[in-house]
Image (cartoon, rainbow, N blue to C red):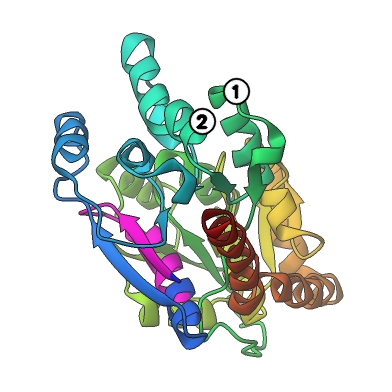
Amino acid sequence: MKICFIERRDADTPSIERVFDTLITEFRSRGIECERQKLPYGNRLVDIFRNLFFFSPEPADIYHIAGHVNYIGLRLPPERTIQTVHDLGILDKRTGLRRSVLGRLFFRAPARRAKRTVAISKATRESLIRISGESREKIVVIPNPVPPGYTERPKQLADRPRILQIGTAPHKNLERTAEAISGLDVHFRIIGKLSETQRSLLDGLELDFSSIDYVDDRSMLEEYIAADIVVFCSLFEGFGMPIIEAQAIGRPVVTSDRSPMREVAGKGALLVDPEDVSSIRQGIETLIWKPDVAENYRRAGLKNAEAYQVSTIADRYLELYQEIFAGRKS
């Protein structure tokens, strides 16, 4: 059985590609032939139509669209195509005709055409059902796996705890988290490029902070290891990888009490209202000042992360591949 993974040409933040790096390595270790094929053009609207016109898939038994280029399913044999949908973020802030066209190209038509669709969380599945009109039975939920090397790394709480924030996009809620931390004796570590407005806010709050625009896989792991607490109070996500990555390392997590963060975290994170600064602050203070509570969340997080091990997630994808492959041969 040969699987061809279809991927976008360029990615500013290659998080999806990292997920499939992990899975493809696991598949190959089990003797599955895997090929990766990038689309010939980029992500602009004109490139979408150029990709649809010029793309020619390599020969394979199964085609797996890795995400964010789901429209290319219109050029693939439907009975041999599986697609993974990570989120519906491309529709955010889109209205009118543009939203309608993108919704049809990226979600409605591909979901109806593909043999099976994978959503990485229940929240993403529900959003996709609303957009595509597809049945719940056709869309299976398979979460993303914990990256390799993310194992428990014990650490004592520092005298000045290091609070790790991952992401600076508007929905990552950096501003409210910064306000919540104001006045606490902590170091605020930020992964992601800060805008001038964000930097001015951080300076105005007189926070002890540092930031880095981008980190590679190894450096990201080191950031988690150095952290005392991971705060991920996002307003919306397709999944929420920082939650399970922090849990797998053994770091207590503060995250949003909304889907999908709530379902991803299980019982292994302190849930807060991401739109309430005082709620975020109370969550962080609880983990700093109540070590027994922090330890309980840490242990529960380690347990929760076990469900996201790559071998477990790979098993679930392979069941789908075998189902499609068997159907093709029958």
x 51%, y 50%: residue: 178
Residue 145 versus residue 325 in the image, above or below: below
**Within the magenta stretch, is there residue 14?**
yes
**Which quadrant of the figure contains the N terminus?**
bottom left
Residue 217 versus residue 260 in the image, above or below: below
| Residue that carries the numbered disc 1 in the rendered image | 133
| Residue that carries the numbered disc 2 in the rendered image | 112
Q: In this view, does 215 lie to the left or right of 9?
A: right
**Within the magenta stretch, is there residue 45?**
no
Is residue 198 at least partly visible in the picture? yes
In front of the other: 298 or 32: 32
Q: In which quarter of the image is residue 297?
A: bottom right
Q: Of the residues tagged 2 and 1, which is closer to the observer?
A: 2
Q: What element carries label 2?
A: helix
Q: Give the range drawn in magenta.
A: 2-22
x 66%, y 50%: residue: 141
Where is residue 283 shown, x and y percent of the image? 73, 55
In front of the other: 227 or 37: 37
Q: Which residue type carries mark 1?
A: Gly
